[in-house]
Every structure is written in structure tokens, then in C-alpha cells.
Image: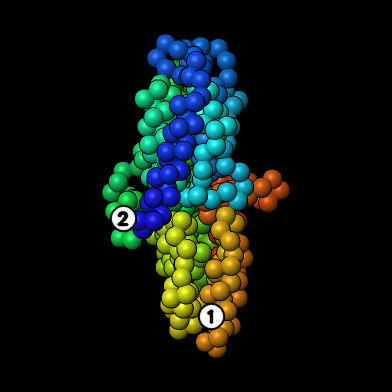
Amino acid sequence: MNGRGAVLAARIRTAAAALILVPFAACAGPGGATSDVAERTIRAVATTSIVADAVREVGGDRVEVTGLMGPGVDPHLYRASEGDVRRMSEADIVFYNGLHLEGRMSELFAEMGARGIRTVAVAEAIDTASLLRPPEFEGAFDPHVWMDVGLWRLAVARIADALAELDPTHAETYRARAAAYGVRLDSLDAWVRSRVEEVPEAIRVLVTAHDAFNYFGRAYGFHVRGLQGISTVAEAGTADVQALARYVAEARIPALFVESSVSPRSIEAVQAAVRARGFDVRLGGSLYSDALGGVGSGAETYEGMIRHNTETIVSALAGGDG
């Protein structure tokens, strides 16, 4: 972990240095550029596509949202460019997931906050008692909270509170939109619970490239095995591949899943290793983990992503013969 930590620290220093070079005349601050937001559209920046989608749902036509990471972008490896930092510095408010999801850019966001830019870590509004703390993740929390629809509802409420604080004139609009979206999320959560009942309990095992689905597993009754752990910064070794292959072959798990934001090579290596053990496991499809899909994918919204993932998982596992 020391080598990876050095790389991440270097990325933080690079981004922080870029921040210093950006003019801050347009930065938001008390009595500054945000004082007129009631009379105009709010300029918001969101890091991941998942966070951006939630901000659009809550903000409606009152908020113009710029997303930094598009479809297929891995936030664990996200590297802020000078242009990205400029966009954030010129925004009225910046939303990010937090919990160290975005390449451990906490120092960059802290620097922005010190310069008067409003930054909001939406996932950090969730009570820590509800968060997972994997032992292999250096004592930090698992940041993939959106995989539990009920938890993501809490992050949405935080977005509404932040916009209401920034723009009190339209506070009720943001809270009403968040409440209406929350009703849809409650319906989505119930739908997921109903669909996964089709998978026999003995094979409710979700094997993916990295551990992005632990909240999904806890909420909906799946055992989750990720090859790379919580973060994709660390690459899986041969021993990791063989250990996972042995587990899959012995448990006769019918399908493995690749992820849209992670190279499929590692899971394909597991598949080959399982077959070498005499069990023919198939690839069950591609799941969206750290990013939404592109336009036309059916997963370009959070609701679409959750539905796509659930249908893919259920179809692959429930249709398997073990």
C-alpha cells in the first residue's frame, strides 16, 4: 500500500498546485458571487456521473450541473486536470461523493473550502453506523453507498439541504423535488427486493472485478466477492485470481460479472482459471459500478443503472443450472 499511497499523494499535490494557479475572482463565498443565485441559474459541479444525476434530479431547471467524470470513468483513479479545477473554482457549489472515493482528493476539496468554494460530500451525510468499514481498506469506510438505494436516498436529502442553504429563496422547491424523487427511489428499492427473490439463496453470490457491490449485497441478500478489493488502485495478482477461481469452482457459481469502469481482463482471467479446474463458469454480463452508462445504454440515470444491474444479475444467476 505504501507505493500506491505515494502515487495518490502525488496526484493530490498536482491537483492542489493547479488549484493555486486558478484565478479565484469568481469563487463562491459569503456575500460574494453566490449572493444573487435566487435571480439566476445555480452553477454546480459534480464529480461522478452518479452524483451529477442526483443533483440534476433535485435541482431541476434551477441548477446547471457540470459533471467531471463521464461514462466508464473510474473515480478511484480520477486525476483532476487544471481545467477540472478551474470549473470547480468557478462553480457556486461542488458536490462529490466523499469517503475517499474520488482518488483520495480530500486535500484538494479542503483547499477549495478554505478558499470559499462550497463543497459538499454527499455520502458523508450518512450516519457512520450505516456504513461498511472493510478491514482491508485501511480503516476507512466503503464509499460505494449508492448500491443500497435506501442509503442513496439519504445522500439525495443532503443535496437538497445544501442547495436550500445556498439558495434559501427556492429551498422548498429543492426539498419538494427531493421528496418526489425519494418516492421513486422507495419504489425502486422495493422492485429490487422483489426481483432478487428469483435467485436461489444458495447461489446469491456476486463475483465482480472489485468490491463495489458490498452495500448491494448487504441490502439485498447477496454474498459479494470482488477480485481487486474496494479500490481499483491495487491490481490483483495471480494468487488472488487462483483463490477466487477455487472458490467459484467449489461453490459452482454459475456466472461472473465484468464492470463498465474496470478492464474485463481480470475477470476473464478468473473465468479461465475456473475452467481449468473443470467448471464452466460464464460471464453474466457487464454491471455499472462507479459510473453510469452512456446515452442510450438504459443506464444513463441512477434508476436505470440499478435496474440494469439487477436484471443482469438475476438473469445470469437465476438462469444458471449451477
**Does any portion of residue 70 appear in the rendered image?**
yes
Front residue of 258 and 3: 3
Amino acid type, residue under disc 2 in the picture:
Glu
Image coords of residue 82 (percent x, y): 54, 33
Residue identified by numbered label 2: 138
Quadrant of res 64: top right
Q: Which residue in the rendered view is the most extreme toward the right?
A: 296
The residues bearing labels 1 and 2 have C-alpha atoms spaced at a distance of 29 Å
Locate residue 138 relative to residue 178 in the image: left or right.
Answer: left
Q: Secondary structure at mark 1?
A: helix
Front residue of 66 and 298: 66
Image coords of residue 24 (percent x, y): 48, 19
The local crowd at label 1, few if under 14, some if 14 to 19, many if 20 or more residues have their Cα within 10 Å, is: many
Amino acid type, residue under disc 1 in the picture:
Ala
Q: Secondary structure at mark 2?
A: loop
| Quarter of the figure with the C terminus | bottom right
Residue identified by numbered label 1: 273
- Residue drawn at x 49%, y 31% is 18
Image coords of residue 91 (percent x, y): 52, 24
Vertical order, 40 against 319 (above or below): above
| Quarter of the figure with the N terminus | bottom left
- Residue drawn at x 66%, y 51% is 298
The local crowd at label 2, few if under 14, some if 14 to 19, many if 20 or more residues have their Cα within 10 Å, is: few
The numbered disc on residue 206 is none
- Residue drawn at x 42%, y 38% is 13
Quadrant of res 282: bottom right
Image coords of residue 309 (percent x, y): 57, 58
- Residue drawn at x 49%, y 82% is 249
